[in-house]
Amino acid sequence: MDRTIECASDQEAAHYVPPPIGNGELCLALDMEGIQRQRKYVSDYPGIWWAGRRYSDRLQRPMIPYGFLEHGIAEAPVRWTQRLNPGRAQIATDCVYPDGQRVETEAFVHAELPILALRKRSNRPYTLQFLLRRPGPSGDVPAHMRFSAEKIANGIEIRYEIEGLPERTGRVQFLCDMPARATLGGERFSLATDGPCASFFLVFTDAMEGAEGAERTLASARRALDLGFEGLRDSHEKSWSAYWEASHVSMPESREAEVYAVAQYHLRISTTAWSIPAGGISNHWQGAYYAFDEYFPFMALATSGRLGLASRIPAFRHKILRKARLRSFQHWGEEDRTDFGARYHFMCDENGDECTPPGYWLEHIFQMANVALCAWEYFRYGADRAFLAEKGYPVMAACAEFFRTQALYECGDGRLIVGKCTDLERLGPARENAFMTTCGVIATFESSADAAARLGIDGEKAAAWRALAERLRAGLPREDGRYVPHPGCSKKSISVLAGTFPYRVLPAEDPVQWAAISDFIASENEYGNMYPVGNSVCAWYAGWKGLTFARLGRWDDAHACLRAIAGEANRFSEIFEVRDPPMCPWFCTAEGTYIQLFNECLLASTEGEIRILAFPAPEYAFRLAAVGGILVEAAFEASRLCRLKLIASAPYAGNVILPDGREIRVDLARDASVALI
């Protein structure tokens, strides 16, 4: 996949946001000058961030900033062009300054190493500066950081430590492959060259990497100096090429396809060793992991067939399961009890510790449903029974038991409901029998029972979960022939779509669900943002609506949602949390829903059935995942399916339904494949 998106100074400048580059570990955004001049772009100042590196002395555990880049040119450019190539994960800029100096930049963060590489071409001497300061107007040194610096061969080495965090002790090497004059000035470090071309490298190592990891990084930096910018870029591009070959959607140029490619790119650079932060690896919400939100980018990875990356999320939730159990119940001498299930924090850090600021969102419980469903959907798409038994099911059962023991109330009239909690935040606190939360609880009970049946365990517990799910479904709140967000609710909410997406606990033909969907859509311009602002439908909600349409077989409406989201995308085809007014660019939650919607408009699947869909483009091809451990390769020419191949990672038996309605029965052994067309 090789696609370039260009932004230039002669275009409308409103809401320009520097595009990010990264690798799931190191992440930063470079502006139109190929540096990080300190301006606020919508909600953030550009800086350098390193996943997993955060303070532990404050409630929200903010990420440690690793400075930013500037250069020796004070004036702003009079003309500039910036290009993002998501296929190669690279940025290029071209700037002309008032005095006639021209500076061109090529930059990337290596796909597998914490190394930033920049190549600068200039018609005059050029100085690149690294400032070890907190991004933003204060210009302060990062909190609790002490450092020393010295000149070394080819550049500068900075050694630092964070008071009270010995595992964050590390060093930054600021290097140049050409003769450069090094200057150390407080927190500002400069490498000055005489041009016309020089490559610069920022290399990050710390104790968290371990001695072996740090040596690997430093060895790669030495190799980069030997091989030059091109040598390091070659291995970077090979890694990204393999990523795009593993899963792809190829179709003629269109805004929808471009937004899809950029969203796939950004999810890749935002997928850490733990999970996917809702705002990417940056200071959006301190890079914390939202147990509710991570389900949506997870589903993007799963439906795309990127199961290796997707597995990190349920594996992370299993790793911190004991902490979630202790959050559910902890008392002196009873720390190992498991009969009250697990309650995951709404927001947490890499250790599973609380990052949620005070507020009524602390009373969310719907995140346990999404934690459980990530584990279940990983099994559905990957058919990895060993993972389900070892990691997935223990998490699912713990979430189900939390709901069973701590969230349900008998009403005395035979009804069973979920008690007071915070549902979607626009609905306010203390909502009893909230529709979306209840649908999530039903989905948790039923998927956990299905998982127990697959493993042949916990038969009595599974039967109890199923019985509870049926009672909850019978008591879902409804008024005037439609489901409502909660009893007596005077507002409209996207939450009433939750019986179809994300939880799929109501039949497609349910007239009460369709009445609720129609009622929300009639008022969506007023209630279509996550916050009570603007007069539009945010991208996440539009994707949510589109996936609801897809699951109801309303494909024209689903395609219209794709077009609407793409039409709202910004300068580099990035998706905002809210577009009117602009809030939080490069929003992973909405990107995940957009990708899943795009995928499910091409390929729909359930247990034992794969449906190849007609998409409104004459020529396209894809390689995506289907439920049951299947990869599907398909190609269309002149709107006709001309190639179809299935590849099984597990035994599979089911029907494949073609766009013209024909059905083909397939039976595949593990690791077998079949070309059907």
Image (spheres, rainbow, N blue to C red):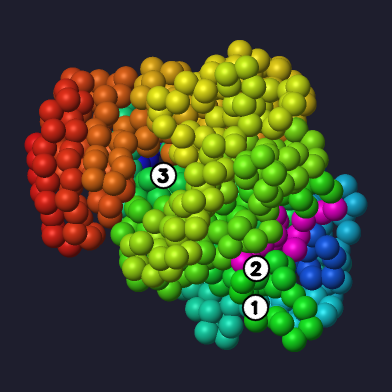
Front-lying residue, 579 or 389:
389
Residue that numbered label 2 is attached to: 340
Residue stretch in magenta: 340-358
Local packing at callout 1 (Cα closer than 10 Å; few below 14, some 14-19, many 20+) is: some
Front-lying residue, 486 or 4:
486
Residue 461 image offset from top left, x and y in percent: 48, 64
Q: Is 135 positioned to the left or the right of 542 in the image?
A: right
Residue 447 image offset from top left, x and y in percent: 44, 53
Q: Is 154 positioned to the left or the right of 5 in the image?
A: right
In the displayed image of the protein, which residue is found farthest to the front? 413
Residue drawn 59% across the image and 77% down it: 209
Q: Are marks 2 and 3 in contact (CB under 8 Å)?
A: no
Element class at badge 1:
loop
Q: Amino acid at mark 2?
A: Phe
**In the image, is residue 261 above or below residue 111?**
above
Local packing at callout 3 (Cα closer than 10 Å; few below 14, some 14-19, many 20+) is: some
Q: Are marks 3 and 1 in contact (CB under 8 Å)?
A: no
Front-lying residue, 405 or 412:
412
Q: Amino acid at mark 3?
A: Gly
Q: Is 644 positioned to the left or the right of 210 in the image?
A: left
Q: Quadrant of the C terminus?
A: top left
Element class at badge 3:
loop
Residue 125 shows up from this direction: no
Element class at badge 2:
loop
Q: Are marks 1 and 2 in contact (CB under 8 Å)?
A: yes
Q: Marks 2/3: CA distance?
A: 46 Å
Front-lying residue, 614 or 156:
614
Local packing at callout 2 (Cα closer than 10 Å; few below 14, some 14-19, many 20+) is: many
Image mark for residue 551: none
Image mark for residue 337: 1
Instruction: Tell me where residue 319 sits by quadrant.
Output: bottom right
N-terminal of the pair, mark 3 or mark 1, is 3
